Image: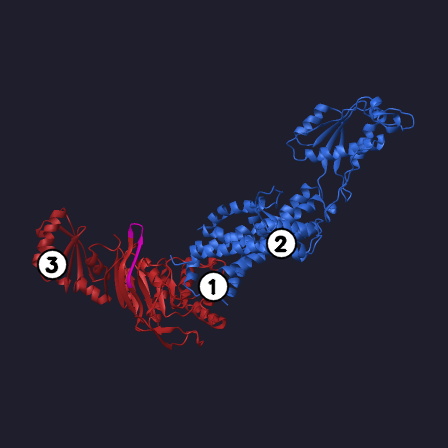
Amino acid sequence: MYRFLLPRRPAPWGREGDALPLAQGAGIALRADRLSKRYGDLLAVNELTLEVNEGEVFGLLGPNGAGKTTAINMMCGLLRPDGGQAYIHGLPVHGAAADVRARVGVCPQDIVLWGTLTCLEQLEFVAAMYDVPRDAARRRALVLLETMGLGEKRGKLARTLSGGLQRRLNFIMALVHDPGIVVLDEPEAGLDPQSRVMIREYIKSLSRSKTIILTTHNMDEADRVADRVAIIDHGSLLVVDTPEQLKRQAGEGDVLEVEASGGGPALLERATASVAQAMPQASVAASGGTITVRARGAVELLPVVVKVLRDAGLRPGEVRLRENTLEDAFIALTGRRLRE
Amino acid sequence: MRFLGVLRKNLWELRRDAWGLVLTLVTAPFFVILYWLMTSGGSTTYDVLVLNHDAAAQVAGVAAGTGGDAVLSAMKAVTYPDGQPMLKVTLVLDRAAADVKLKNRDADALIIIPQGFTRTVLAWRREAGSPATAGPPAAVTIAGDLTNPQYAVAAVVATTALDGYVRSVTGQVYPIDVVEVPLGASRARTEFEIYVPGLLIIAATMLIFKAAMSVTREVEAGTLRRLRLTRMTALDFLGGVSAVQVLVGVASVLTTFLTAWALGFRSQGPLWVAIAVGAVTSLAVVGVGLLIACFSRTTNEAFIIGNFPLILLMFFSGAVFPLPRVPLFTAGGRVIGLYDFLPTTPAVDALNKVLTMGAGLRDVAYELSALLILSLLYFAAGVFLFKRRHLRTG
């Protein structure tokens, strides 16, 4: 099905002969085909099928324990699936040569560094493990260190760096061999604000030349940088689409949230039904003492909501008006909040 | 290139883990110094107490004096080939006080010379008449703590000196004459020198922790997972790691040898053969280290698990003290014992022959071949299992 195509594309570091063959299906950087993984009774990933296009930033979203990292590990070749197969540029990952896996650069969620090597040494060492020639590896390592604000720290041992700087170094370790596909597992986790902005900007700049897959449980992060997003929960893929389209699925327009007090859940439920009856164009839901109204021009509906609540014997409290988010899309898809 | 990359990276790490390196290098030299002190800088001197009840006796034609004093002198005159006395002889006057010293192991044996010792010995002279007319023999008593490992040697040496004196004075002829023929250069070896080959093997064996922990550290830190994504092969990784560890092993053997040399040890055979034995043994120990790493997820686990093979390699190979063989079968005219499957067993045998007996490469060809085969087997098993356990997709 997937036959190798050979024109060779030039190696990133410019050495002829190191180029990797492209496969049929060029345009699709990575494909998961019914990937499954089970740990005892827990089905961590359940027949996951998705495609990541060349040059796009793809967000894999889901709560902690949803199966994102397991899915990514199977797609990169770190974990053998119980069922299914992953393909990188059309080539099967499992049972393939190391060349296929080497097309991917992975930044793990945890900091994975050699504490007694300097910043430059570890970048050069990892590059050597990808067969990058020494001169090219040094040039690229120095550029990456400079880009991440680590230029002056290149001779420092990794263990002597602050947590934020270690995370930056952890990030560029995935890029030192100039892979076509970059997988970032929770790239903003544990980052200080300065590092977060720096890495976010760099991801954006990379997106022009590389395929980027990022796993995150931070919906805002994905909304800001991802071209397409897949939402995964309990190991199953719920939806794949652009952030805009997903937000649209959650409900057109804005979100109006009104806190209501002075009554029990039954009273709130009746009030919610009354609000829904009064504004059939809107989507209305209640959760934890808050009534949520989704509709175009939701702010104009605020007086109606307040009146209905008062008529029902409830006291309107804090009012929040915001745009639809991916989290709303997630709630709409799963019926629960992301961190529940 | 990847192999060299791993090698270079491990050398960087080694240079920066100064404590780990120093501890690995100084452990065996520390034991060398300890053994040197235990053997009084060469060979053990045994403490012998003498309770002399003997009185002088005058016999026509024989110089005046007591035989007891002469026995004391004979004991003091027993020396090692290098002139170091074998016995430290102390005259005591009180049996009870002597027993306390024996119990406290402040002395190894007590010789009690009876009252009529001189008279009896003189009466047994050949020219004095037949044994039938000489009267009953003198009852010399030897007392000691039989659980004290030094007692037997002290008692044998003391009685040999006593016997020598008696034979020289009485002129009695024994029906047998025992002739001792020392093998190789063994006569000239001090007790300290006899321990050195085993200590050199211990130097290589101490590598077991460093080898196991250096690999397990990569598992624990997750860096091995990062490397699994690269083009690096198991052979690149384990070859690079092992090459550095073998270098440390050879350095450890050399440091130990130099320490022993500074304390008076001299090799009887070619040194390069001994170093080759140390290098090959290091390879086997690294293989065992990889096997330990297969069963360890953390460096702590590696350290704890490592103690078991360390004890096997050290104590069951004869590196620390000789053990009786446990024969299993015969192959090619050689009896193969249970402990022969430990790589350190042929290593100790080879080093004993080279360093103590002055054997050359040809003389230890069998031991070296066995060591090489065992080393390759252990190393191959370590690589195979480590690859399955830690380098295969889970």
Q: Amino acid at mark 3?
A: Pro
**Dot 2 crowding, Cα within 10 Å, few <14, some 14–19, many 20+:** few
Disc 1/disc 3 C-alpha distance (Å) = 61 Å
Q: Both on one chain, marks 1 and 3? A: yes
| Cβ atoms at labels 1 and 3 below 8 Å apart | no
Q: Secondary structure at mark 1?
A: helix
Residue underneath mark 1: A122
Q: Which residue is mark 3?
A: A303
Measure how far apart labels 1 and 2 are at the Cα level.
45 Å
Magenta span: helix, strand or loop, mainly? strand
User: Chain A rendered in what hue?
Assistant: red
Which residue does the image show at 8% across and 54% down from the upper left? A274
Which chain is tinted blue? B
Residue named by callout 2: B366
Secondary structure under badge 2? helix
> Looking at the figure, which quarter contains the C terminus of chain B?
bottom left
